[in-house]
Image: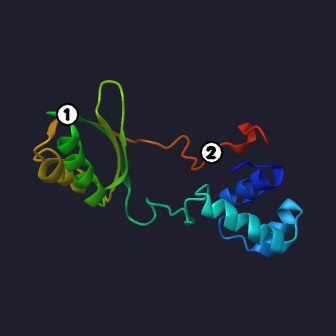
Amino acid sequence: MTLDEFDIAILRALQADGALTNAALSQRVHLSASQCSRRRAALENAGLIAGYAARLDGEKLGFGLRAIVRVNLRRHGGDNDRSFARFVERRFEVRSAFSVSGDADYILDLRTPDLEAFARFIHEHLLPHDQVAQVRSEIVLRTVKDEPGVDLSRHPCA
């Protein structure tokens, strides 16, 4: 899909506030509400908009501990990787998981209520997993930047 400056403006506005109505969106991007509706649907159908969600404050909701966990697997290959991927997909503590290059095979972003719940996840679920060889964890002390989405000002149409 080829994007123009109006598509970028719509994406930028929706990334900032996914709850915008087409009427409100039209005022921000200077198109009619019907044009915004058609373009928004096209962007959704093309998969450029993956979904809409509210950003919740985990700490205020009782998930006060955030940790970054680096995992190395015992063996590599299709079934081993799929088994570990299925495991992390099922665990509510794991908010994001990435297969990476470097000194770890996977990086996990975890949220738990407290250190006790974190330790329980590590010792009762992650370490006993058949594919896990090594786990290294960093507890987040302070979030400096946690910005979702992409910087659309770098897009060629911006």
Give the residue pinned by disc 1.
76
Any part of residue 7 in sight: yes
Q: How many marks?
A: 2
In this view, the residue in front, 28 or 56, is 28
Q: Nearer the viewer, residue 126 or 12?
A: 12
Q: Residue at x 55, y 66 (%)?
A: 53
Task: Tell me if mark 2 has few (under 14), some (14-19) or many (20+) residues whose alpha carbon lies within 10 angstroms of its own.
Answer: few
In front here: 82 or 14?
Answer: 82
Vertical comparison of 52 with 155: above or below: below
Residue type, label 2: Val
Q: Which residue is mark 2?
A: 150
Q: Position of residue 54 (x, y in %)?
A: 56, 66
Mark nearer the viewer, 1 or 2: 1
Alpha-carbon span between mark 1 and mark 2:
31 Å
Q: Is residue 45 above or below residue 7?
A: below
Q: Residue at x 68, y 57 (%)?
A: 16
Q: Nearer the viewer, residue 156 or 122?
A: 156
Q: Is residue 52 above or below residue 118?
A: below
- Position of the C terminus, as image quadrant, is top right
**Residue 35: x and y, percent?**
82, 69
User: Of label 1 and label 2, which has the lower sequence position?
Assistant: 1
Q: Is residue 127 above or below residue 17?
A: above
Dot 1, how many residues are within 10 Å of its Cα: few (below 14), some (14-19), or many (20+)?
Answer: few
* Disc 2, SS: loop
Residue located 65% across and 65% down the image: 18
Display coloring: rainbow
For badge 1, the amino acid type reads His
The image shows residue 46 at horizontal and vertical percentages of: 62, 58
Is residue 158 among what the camera can see? no
Task: Identify the image quadrant of residue 61.
Answer: bottom left
